[in-house]
Structure formats: C-alpha cells, structure tokens
Image (cartoon, rainbow, N blue to C red):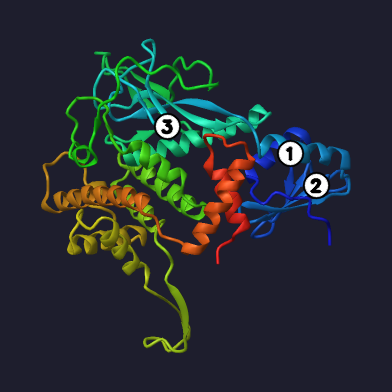
Amino acid sequence: MSENLLKWPNLDSTELRILLHEIIGGMGQADLGVAKPSEFYLPMAGPSCRVVLKFKGKKVVAIEPGPAFDAAQWREISNEIEHSILAGPTRIGREYSFSGRRVIGSWRGEHSGDQILPAPADAPSAPVESADHPFILEFPLMVASRNAVTNYRRLRKHRDLTLLLNILLVGGAKSMGFRPTHFWAVDPADLSHNSKWAQQGFFAPLGPWLIHELSTPAAEQLEELAPEEYEAVLGHDGGGLRVPSDLDQSIRSYESLSAPNREKFDRAAFWFGTASGMRDVSISASFAAFASAIESLTSRGNRHDFRFCPVCGKPGKHEVPGPTRLFKNFIATYAPDASLAKDRDRMYAMRSTVLHGSDVMELDQSIPIMGWSPWGFMEGELYNGMWRVTRTALRNWLKSPPPQSSYLQKAREVCAYFHWIERGRPLWHAEVDWEWAEQEFPRE
C-alpha cells in the first residue's frame, strides 16, 4: 500500500490544489470514464506523474507518490503548508457587494471585525432607489505567502459573507458572481431607445484588495435599529440601508458554527440567494430554491427496511419522519409566528408540484397583458409568504443551531481554546481552532 503523504486533515482541498498547481504545474489528468472519478494525477498521468490525489467526493483524502515523485519538492510543499497555508498573519480583505438599499454610511462590527463602507464618490451609482447599490465590504482574512491562495480565500469569504448579509439585511445583498451574463439592454435615459448587446459587470475604484487594518469609517454611520423594529421596515421607504443592532452578533454566530453546521448553513444561504436572483426569470424556480434552502437545514429521518409494501407487495425502504413532515416541522420550529399550519401545507404542496414537474406557477405561464387573476394573486401571496418564512427560519436557526452532546461540545471548546493559545492568540479565524478541535474530538 502506497504511503499517504497527506498529513494535514484540516487542509482545504482547493487551497491544496492551488499550491500544487503553482509548484508542480500542469493541468492534471483524471479517468473521467468512470462514474465517480477518485484519482487526479499531477502534472499528468503516466511516467511523469509526481503525485496522485485521492478524492472522496469533493475532498482530497490522500496523496500518494507517483512514478516521478520528487522528495525534495515534496519537502518544500510540506514546509509551505505548515508555515504558510495553515498559519499566517491576519489582514483585511476588500471587495464590492451590492444592496437593495442605497448605502450612504458605514458600519463596523466590534467583534466580527467586518465593515460596510459606502462606495467612493467617483464610483458608478444607480439613478433610482430600486436598484443594486454598490458598497465596499471589508473583513478579516488570514493570508498565505502565495497571492493565489490569499485571493481565493478573499473571494470565498466575500461570497459567503455577502450571502449571509443577504439573509440578515432588509434589501438583501449580492455579489457580482463569477459567470457574468450577456443580454440586450436599453439605457432609460436614451430617448431613442437604442438597444445594445451588453455584458453584466461593474468596475469602480476599490484601492488595494488587501490592507493591514480596516479603512477609516465614513463620516456618517448607518442607522441601527432594534431587531423587532428592523424587521418591520421591509418596504422600500427610500431611507437607505439600515442595519439591525444584533448584526455583529449574528455574524459572530455564523463564524462560531461547527463545521457540519457551517456547511449546512452555507448551502441554505446559497439557495436563498439563488431564489432572490431567479425571481425575475422564474417564480417557480425561485419558490423551489426557497424550499431547498429550508431542506438544507433539515436532518434525514431514520431509515428502515420493510418486507412488503401494502400496495405492490415488494420490499423497500422507509424514512421516519419523511421529508414532508421534516419540512413542516422545521418551519413550525424556526418560524412559528410567520405562517399558519394550512399555509405550510400549501407551501410544501407547491414545492412538490414544481420540483416533480407536475406544473409551474401561473405567474410563469401567464402573459402580463391582462389584469390580475384570483389564482395568480393567491400564488403571489404564497410566494411572498415563502420568502418571509424562509428568511425568518434561517435567521432563527442561526441564533440557535442544533445542539451537540454537552460533553463533546465542552471538550471541543477546551481543545479549541488551547489551540488558539498555541497560535499566538490571534483576534480572528476562530474556525481554524474549531476545525482542529473537531479533528481531535470527532463526532460520537
């Protein structure tokens, strides 16, 4: 059996691949003829292969030497992993995000270290209030010696933090994305209404994308409202972006999630953001994405076998509780005041109708040249209710994620604390210490 060169269980697989690409080079090769490719050869397969990456799903779980393995080069890679990838100073990453409310002031989280800044005066701005208004998002970031790794971390954290703000802020938040689209467009100010083939994009002065400390706040601060008062301001009153007074606490709650819970919440945040972006394309797809956001946070029921199906007489498998009950129970637990039981039944029925291909919502089928219809109005109300329920449930889940064993939790907290001391007591990146603790004390 070949030696496993991977000695760092908490090493991010993408960061590992970036490092190997920069040092070893090559595009890599894999056997794509199998259903689940599990081996990746660098720089290519055959006699010139130096290392073989073994995958389990999306994660690299082992690295084995290839025919052209270079021991000296691997020592260089190992040294960089231990002293640069897994350890490094903290800087501040920066990038543009967009809000459904105009950002005219700044906000800084005392504990999270994140900051919202208005775009500079010479940045492009929307001439109307109902638009995607740019702002600069700053956040703590552990840097590596290689810019490619650091920039990957910056882009990833900016995306994840923006998706989180999309749930927490009235008006939402979005980033430009990595796959810009092309479309026909007209300039509303052009009275001749000339059409242009355009690419989605935004370019504005940003300054350095990595700095040593948070930028100077704006002269005006964003207004903070109590959470209950903040949630009552869902309409667009033209007052610009405001933030809830517990925003910093909510961000810290997100950063303190265990690795399994963080993965689940990131998946839910992705679907919630997708639902927001899909609304103008398909109400049905957007509705289904809201349902996927909820189901990302539910657990699977207990599966058991049964000998005979009462209908067909054949053996099969059954989960208790099933997905329908899990969906409704989740909403009843995390958004009890945002919906009635009959509304939850209608939401799940619509979710099943759309995802199983039985039908699409009337708002997707009708041509908008007529007035409203009773069924279309009811579906619109159901969609708005689904948005409200999903957002409320995700926010409440973040405040109170599923508990773990009290003994396991305490052991991990102590382990993470001492690991933090060994790292020199840095102010940020508690997830590094928590991931270490989870490795030392795995799930029971």
- Residue 220 picture location, percent across and down: 29, 17
The Cα–Cα distance between marks 2 and 1, rounded to whole angstroms, is 9 Å
| Residue in the picture at 37% in, 49% down | 398
Taking the spot 37% from the left edge, 23% from the top edge, the residue there is 134
Q: Which residue is mark 1?
A: 20
Q: Is residue 173 visible?
A: yes
Q: Quadrant of the N terminus?
A: bottom right
Which amino acid, mark 2?
A: Val
Residue 175 shows which numbered tag? Answer: 3
The percent coordinates of residue 391 (x first, y second) are: 30, 47
Kindly identify the amino acid type of the residue bearing the numbered disc 3.
Ser
Secondary structure beneath disc 3?
A: loop
- Alpha carbon of mark 2 to alpha carbon of mark 3: how far? 36 Å
Residue 109's tag is: none
Residue picked out by circle 2: 51
Provide the secondary structure element on which disc 2 rests: strand
